[in-house]
Image (cartoon, grey):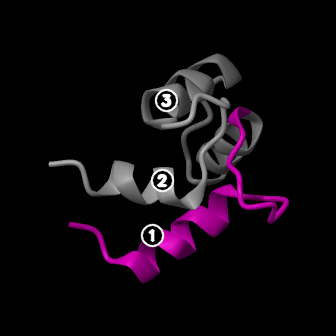
Amino acid sequence: MADIESARTAFERFDRDGDGLITANEYKSAMAQLGDPFVTETVAQAIINAHDGNGDGMLTFDEFWASQNKV
């Protein structure tokens, strides 16, 4: 199980504009900064879609947190 404070810090790193949502573009940019320049926007969207509970194409903190705690 992930630590919620670490998860919040990670979420904020991905949520570049601070609107509480992670978009595919934000995910791609964060991954590039973390050293993975090979994540395309298409791949980022597929990853988001796999954890997107409400189907809006973006991740909220709750969705991000839930994805960190899947066993």
Question: In what quadrant of the picture does the N terminus appear?
Answer: bottom left
Question: In the image shown, does 33 or 7 lie closer to the viewer?
Answer: 7
Magenta stretch, residue numbers = 1-24
Say if the magenta span includes residue 68. no
Upstream in sequence: badge 1 or badge 2: 1
Question: Residue most toward the bottom?
Answer: 5
In this rendering, position of residue 36 left or right of residue 66: right
Characterize the local packing of mark 1: few (<14), some (14-19) or many (20 or more) Cα atoms within 10 angstroms. Answer: some
| Amino acid type, mark 2 | Phe
Q: Position of residue 2 (x, y in %)?
A: 28, 69
From the image, tell me which residue sits under label 2. 64
Q: Is residue 54 above or below residue 20?
A: above
Q: Is residue 29 above or below residue 66?
A: above
Q: CA distance from mark 3 to mark 2?
A: 11 Å
Q: Residue at x 48, y 50 (%)?
A: 63
In this rendering, position of residue 12 left or right of residue 54: right
Mark 1 and mark 2 residues within 8 Å of each other at the beta carbon:
yes
Question: Residue most toward the left?
Answer: 71
From the image, tell me which residue sits under label 3. 47
Give the secondary structure at mark 1: helix
Residue 60 seen: yes
Give the secondary structure at mark 2: helix
Q: Position of residue 11 (x, y in %)?
A: 58, 63
The part of the image, by quadrant, that contains residue 55 is: top right
In this rendering, position of residue 37 left or right of residue 19: left
Residue 7 disc label: 1
Say if the magenta span includes residue 5. yes
Q: Is residue 9 above or below residue 58?
A: below
| Amino acid type, mark 1 | Ala
Q: CA distance from mark 1 to mark 2?
A: 8 Å
Question: Residue most toward the right?
Answer: 17
